[in-house]
Amino acid sequence: KSRKLFLASLAFVYFAKAFAGAYMKSSITQIERRFDIPSSLIGVIDGSFEMGNLLIIAFVSYFGAKLHRPRLIGIGCLIMAVGSFLVALPHFFQGLYKYETSVSHKAAVNSTETILPCLFSPRPPECEKAAGSPMWIYVFLGNMLRGIGETPVMPLGISYLDDFSREENTPFYLACIHTVGILGPMFGFMLGSFLSKIYVDTGFVNLDTITITYKDSRWVGAWWLGFIVTGTVVLLSSIPFFFLPKSLPKQGQEQEEIQSKSTELATKTEQEQFLPEETQEKVKFQEMAKDFIPSLKRLFRNRIYSLIILASLVIVNGFIGLITFKPKYIEQVYGQSATKAIFLIGILNLPAVALGFITGGFLLKRFKLGIVGAARVAISASLGSFCLLAVQIFVQCENAEVAGLSMSYQRVPQVSYNPQTLLSQCNGHCFCSVKHWDPVCAYNGMTYASPCLAGCQTSTGMGKEMVFHNCTCINEAGLAANASAVLGQCPRKDDCDIKFKIYMALSVIGSYISACGGTPGYIVLLRSIQPDLKSLALGMQTLIVRTLGGIPPPIYFGALIDRTCLKWGTKHCGGRGACRLYNANAFRYN
């Protein structure tokens, strides 16, 4: 019963931590916009999880294996929950979110028309210091706490399960745990998609006065609410571990054998193998520490283990960079909303990964593959997924057409723009702010950075239904008889939707093939190390891979993405905010 309870509890905690982790990934864009920070800094915040993890992973993996492993996992879950609540904390201390806009949306008295700044010199707005704009540090620290709390789950949980299970059953148990765990990212991304449609300050503002939609690059969803939900789920997952025993009898042995051959069985479990029998109840840290360095030397003399570490570094670098910025990639390259991108990842890519884990575990059990057979499955899956990933590079859409920013605007050579100021003859008579991003879509299919830069004279309607008229730049371009525009960016061309479907199909198939090699690769790792080094090996793998494969990718991927920005947002008191528009082709290549 205890073994079944542990298996169910470990599966649930894998679900809970993956649920929280996936929600964090899905909220990256919302956090970036809310705190007006660049992608490189959001990469540092995302990497703080790995930073917290590496602080204690080696000690937890080594010393924790000699202590009460289930209880340590429970304590880790409590710390993860506290971290999630800390991430949400800044929302309650910040003021209301104020997105940048270049338009005064106040209507004239007894008039259906709104006076636009194109006709009048705008008054310089009073600088309102953004309430707690450096509060992203709480998100950083909360995410780091999540990393610290997650540390015991994998090395102690897997080693505990493997110690007290039959060798032939371990692959199936691992496949079950990872399959349940992969449901976490599915729910995490779907929760992220749902909450990204809800305005960040909903309940505190009149939504009729909000002029942007969830498709706008300035929109911020209710990101904070998800961390309260995920923190609560992680908190619940901690409870069963406090009621589990320190050790279990080896699976398949009769109780009588366990009692009569207790000494023999003690040598089969990692937790009891390290210390002499008389000191098992009172662990002495000095004795354990004495053998730490020799154990490390034994571990890294294992060439198979060292090669697996190097392979994992390459794979994880690509995967972390991809999953962190994939919603933004889909948004910028294929013109989809962040909400739709997050939702599709949750309902398409992640079920494919779950099916892949099941397939990999089934292949090992069905064909009774040994360590060499498992290695062949793992490398075949890796090569197959790489080929499909390489093909995705060539599935592209044209850049969004934005007057003065996109090169595709050369199709209207009669209107020349200064790329630094976005000013031209058609809007030179207006008093336009060249820093703000308040896009409008003209009926000629062109996006303008703001109604003023489109030369619009008047507008009708309120809120999201506002329409701008008599836009001189649209008239001068001569592309449409109707010189009016509506709020928001113009949609991409029709063929872009077809290319996006091709991209998602390749992505889903690649995810499935890649996951097929997950369980076999893990079995190769487990079977290539000495039993008494199992927890230490898993912990050191986690330490090294997360240090060099988890922390750097969000930072250098983010820095490369920042270099492709065409239009930066502006903070209330000046200074560069989050990027509003990227060069899609440069983004794709980087």
Image (cartoon, rainbow, N blue to C red):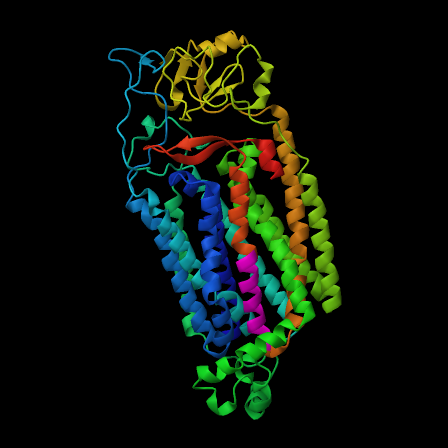
Place residue 195 in its image quadrant: top left
Task: State which region is magenta.
Answer: 533-548
Residue 164 visible to the viewer: no
In this rendering, would 464 be left or right of 533?
left
Report x, y in % for residue 232: 38, 56
Task: Locate the C terminus by quadrant.
Answer: top right
| Position above or below: 80 against 156 | above
Q: Say which residue appears at 35% left-offset and 51% top-offset.
A: 138
Q: Nearer the viewer, residue 569 or 33?
A: 569
Report x, y in % for residue 91: 32, 45
Report x, y in % for residue 136: 37, 47
Residue 567 lies in the magenta-colored region: no
Report x, y in % for residue 396: 64, 32
Residue 292 visible to the viewer: yes
Q: How would you classify the magenta stretch by its main secondary structure?
A: helix
Q: Say which residue appears at 53% left-offset and 83% top-offset.
A: 272
Q: Nearer the viewer, residue 338 or 260?
A: 338
